[in-house]
Image (spheres, helix red, strand yellow):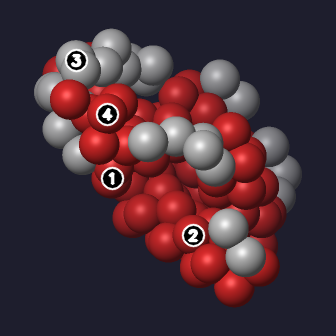
Amino acid sequence: MNKKKYAKEVGMVASIMADFISEKLYKKMQDMGTGYIATHEQIAGWALEFVDKHIKTKWEEVLDNTLKPLSKEMKKQSILCWDDCIADWAYYKLENI
């Protein structure tokens, strides 16, 4: 993956994570004495971690198998797509701050 595709991938993952967890994470960050910028720095870090961990993952193959959620939040539903995997990772990271 070239730098441009890598940057785009990280941006997409961060955007999806933000859609799912930004409000809950912001509240946690406020409780820790930080705020809005720290919230998005955390999401950016988790997005980088996710992309680096799954840089060679073949999502079609992974999603053909039943995935067990990492997070308590996602145990309520099935993981059916790439977005669900990202949401599960984000919730898992949030639950383990």
* Residue 68 position (above or below residue 6): above
Q: For the residues marked 1 and 4, what is the alpha-carbon distance in whole angstroms?
A: 15 Å
Discs 2, 1 touching: Cβ within 8 Å = no
Q: For the residues marked 2 and 1, what is the alpha-carbon distance in whole angstroms?
A: 12 Å
**Nearer the N terminus, badge 1 or badge 4?**
4
**Nearer the N terminus, badge 4 or badge 3?**
4
How far across and down, in percent of the image, does residue 54 sit?
60, 42
Of residues 78 and 92, the one nearer the viewer is 78
Rendered residue at 68%/39% (across/down): 53
Rendered residue at 52%/62% (across/down): 13
Of residues 72 and 30, the one nearer the viewer is 72
Q: For the residues marked 4 and 2, what is the alpha-carbon distance in whole angstroms?
A: 19 Å
| Residue type, mark 3 in image | Thr
Element assignment for label 1: helix
**Nearer the N terminus, badge 4 or badge 2?**
2
Element assignment for label 2: helix
Give the tally of numbered discs.
4
| Residue type, mark 1 in image | Asp
Horizontal arrangement in the rendering, residue 59 relative to residue 1 (left or right): left
Q: Which residue is mark 1?
A: 83
Residue mark closest to the camera, 1 vs 4: 4
Q: Which residue is mark 4?
A: 61
* Residue 72 position (above or below residue 11): above
* Residue 60 position (above or below residue 13): above
Q: Which residue is mark 3?
A: 66
Element assignment for label 3: loop
| Residue type, mark 2 in image | Glu
Rendered residue at 33%/53% (across/down): 83
Of residues 93 and 83, the one nearer the viewer is 83
Residue mark closest to the camera, 2 vs 1: 2
Element assignment for label 4: helix
